[in-house]
Amino acid sequence: MSESCLSLLDTVLHENKLAYVLLSPQQQCLEQGGDVSLFFTTPSPDSDIYELIPELLGCEDIFQDILNGDMPRFELSNVNRSLDNGHIRYVNISIVPHQNQCGEQKTGLLITLSDTTDWLENEQTLTQQRNEMTLLKHSLDDTNQRLNFIMQRYVPKEVSKALMENRLLPDLGGEVREISALFVDLRNYTGISERLTPTETIEMINDFLAVVCQAIVDSGGMVVNYMGDAVMAIFNALEPQPDHARRAVQAGLQMQSNPLQLNCDRTEHQETLYFGVGINTGHALVGNIGALQHYQYTAIGDIINVASRICGQARPTEVLMGANTFNHIGHEVDAESLPPMMLKGKSQPLTVYRVQNLK
């Protein structure tokens, strides 16, 4: 091979951080080239293979197995060497059989070295980045779980879903639409709470909320406000519910079928708490109400005020509804008309119906 070819070969090998040694069957270095910095010592005519590559010390049997054809090749991967500047270099060492050197049929070994420092450092960097991404994903998953928990318990589930799906914009304001509003509150609450500790009172309220909220959710309603011992819910808000009036009445009847039992752990004698339920139907402004610092998804309008007033007139176990609600489902409900009532804030008496059952 000409000197120019050797020079070109060495240049290519040097650029690719490769070096080689041709080893005779007697383990004598016949030729070496490429990036000589990969050798442990600078090559010379008298260099010994173990001086150039000390990691091969003790591999004599492996050399012989490869020469005999018992082993096709041998590799050492990512051998690390400490450099004088304190850095570490990683080298791959490969040994394969070599024949037909210089046109003569001779058998020997070709030992190649490749610098894998950059590749290995990149792999380590990628591994570290993957680990960081995994940790970040776990952190995001935990954050999403906490966010979902918060959104579903501090914001109506339907509202949080609509916000996430961009069906509801997080802006103040709303739209006028026909809804059914339901108010429910406890009867005998004040008298019983006087005999309870604050902790027992909270437990009683939580039991009450569990019963009424389950009834509202079962009927497809949305709880929009807690007011001490009262709850406000609306139907036909975010999702269309043509039968919203019936749904509201169904929720009220379900509440009344599950009166709250207070056991002896809270009071001296077992007592029953009853609910008063008021329902009204009509057009209201539904959307985000409040200030820039705090929004609340709710409904406002005269029909909401009337529903609250009707609830105030309901006796224990009663479900009362306004005339608009009755007009929506009169053919589906057994109800009796009560004497016209004067409700606070209204100039004229209103007709209210007592619900007995749904047909």
Image (tube, rainbow, N blue to C red):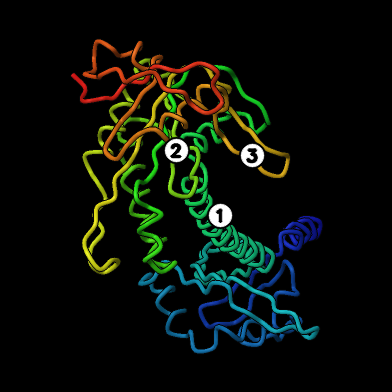
Q: Nearest to the eye among marks 1 and 2: give it.
A: 2
- Measure the C-alpha gap from mark 1 to mark 3: 25 Å
Q: Nearest to the eye among marks 1 and 3: give it.
A: 3
* Quarter containing the C terminus: top left
x and y percent of residue 68 in the render?
Answer: 39, 74
The three-letter code of the residue at mark 2 reads Val
* Quarter containing the N terminus: bottom right
Instruction: Please tell me which residue lies in front, 136 or 199.
Output: 199
Residue of label 3: 295
The three-letter code of the residue at mark 3 reads Tyr
Which mark, residue 223? 2
**1 or 3: tag closer to the N-terminus:** 1
- Measure the C-alpha gap from mark 1 to mark 2: 29 Å
206 horizontally vs 24: left or right: left
Mark 3 surroundings within 10 Å by alpha-carbon count, few (fewer than 14), some (14 through 19), many (20 or more):
some
Numbered disc 2: secondary structure: strand
